[in-house]
Image (cartoon, grey):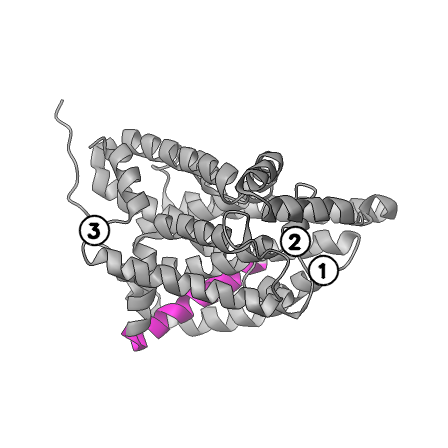
Amino acid sequence: MTQTVAPPTRRIHEIDAVRGFALAGILLANIGFFADPGAAAGGAAQIPQGPVASVVTTLVLTKFYVIFSFLFGYSFTLQMRSWGDQVRGRMLRRCLGLFALGVAQGFLLWIGDILTLYAALGLILLAMRNVRPRTAVITGVTIIGVLTVLWLALAGLTLLDPAAAADQAADPAEAARALALFTGSPLDFLTYQAETYPMLALFVWLGQGPMAMALFLFGMAAGKSRLFEEPERWARLVPRIQLFGFGVGLPAAAFFTWSSTASGSWVLVGVAVNNVTSLFLSAAYVVTLLQLVRRFPLVGTVLSAPGRVAASNYIGQSVLMCLVFTGYGLALAGRLEPIAVMGVAALIYAVLAALSAWWLRGHRYGPVEYGLRALTNLR
């Protein structure tokens, strides 16, 4: 039987710009761990405190992960159109490549890697590729609803036994050991990675997996509906999305930040609220960015370069953060003030954005993307 492949779909500039924007947020969310590795000294990342951390938690944490996961689902629909009846084999190989890349990054660079999770959930998305957009949305809403109810139920149960919900004090000795390994020799850092990554990977899979799956489904539904390709269909809704997204999302995000520093059941209530309201705030971010890109095209040009080579930038962020904060390089973890850490993040993003623009002058894909495409397409 003759296999057919659909003609390649054109790149959608707006998607690249939004993806580049999401990469900036992911960098801001991740760099705090590199600056203070002792926060994950027990196998689960804890939200730090302080003015800068509060701003990042309120405006950044989980919101850009929402956008990035949504775009994964959307991009899958573009790949389906391009791959035609080869979508099954190619997606299987692509997920295999993402999984291998994620394991390598988890042990060598960044213990909070999400590529292995995306690879596993990508297989589920592949199995559900023929569902209608309405069904995908209903399934995603159901997942988020169940998660939210479970968090609220758990918060209620902690009221019955307040002692069980009491926060465990951080172990200073364990945090000091983590920092020593993190900033020691390259071998010390690899020891830290090997000790910490498996437990934190499990935390990422269980803590973020269901939410990511829901966002994949939302993205797939949006892609099948050509949401970004036909913005005129929903342009009139932008003011309402902004009003509701910022009006509800920002106060809820502030509550999430406060609850993360509280104790007992409030922490769980904050997570439950954030499960829902982070979607509203993320949507407001996206439509506002698209309005900004339309009015100032240069913004879209700057953001779309890293967005076109997102996998290379994601790995590149980990490499540069390791060179700044770990024993691979300058070993500055624990030595910079939070505001200085934000400056390092801005510098890293600027360097990678410039490198992306330079690279794309002579290449169609990024270095990591070339490798993934070679495995995906077997050529």
Q: Specify few, some or many for label 1: CA neighbours under 10 Å numbering under 14, 14-19, or 20 or more.
A: some
- Pick the front one: 113 or 191: 191
> Of helix, strand and loop, which mostly describes the magenta segment?
helix
The residue mark sitting in front, 3 or 2, is: 3
> Which circle's residue, 2 or 1, is located before the other in the chain?
1
Question: Which residue in the protein does label 3 denote?
Answer: 364
Residue 64 in the image, given as x and y percentages of width and height: 48, 58
Q: Is residue 28 left or right of residue 375?
A: right
Splitting the image into 4 quarters, where does residue 227 fall? bottom left
Question: Which residue in the protein does label 2 denote?
Answer: 271
Question: The magenta stretch spans which residues?
Answer: 277-297
- The span from disc 1 to disc 3 (Cα, nearest Å) is 45 Å
- The span from disc 3 to disc 2 (Cα, nearest Å) is 40 Å
The residue mark sitting in front, 1 or 3, is: 3
Q: Amino acid at mark 1?
A: Ser
- Pick the front one: 192 or 253: 192
> Which circle's residue, 1 or 3, is located before the other in the chain?
1
> Which circle's residue, 3 or 2, is located before the other in the chain?
2
For label 1, the SS is helix
Q: Specify few, some or many for label 2: CA neighbours under 10 Å numbering under 14, 14-19, or 20 or more.
A: many
Question: Which residue in the protein does label 1 denote?
Answer: 259
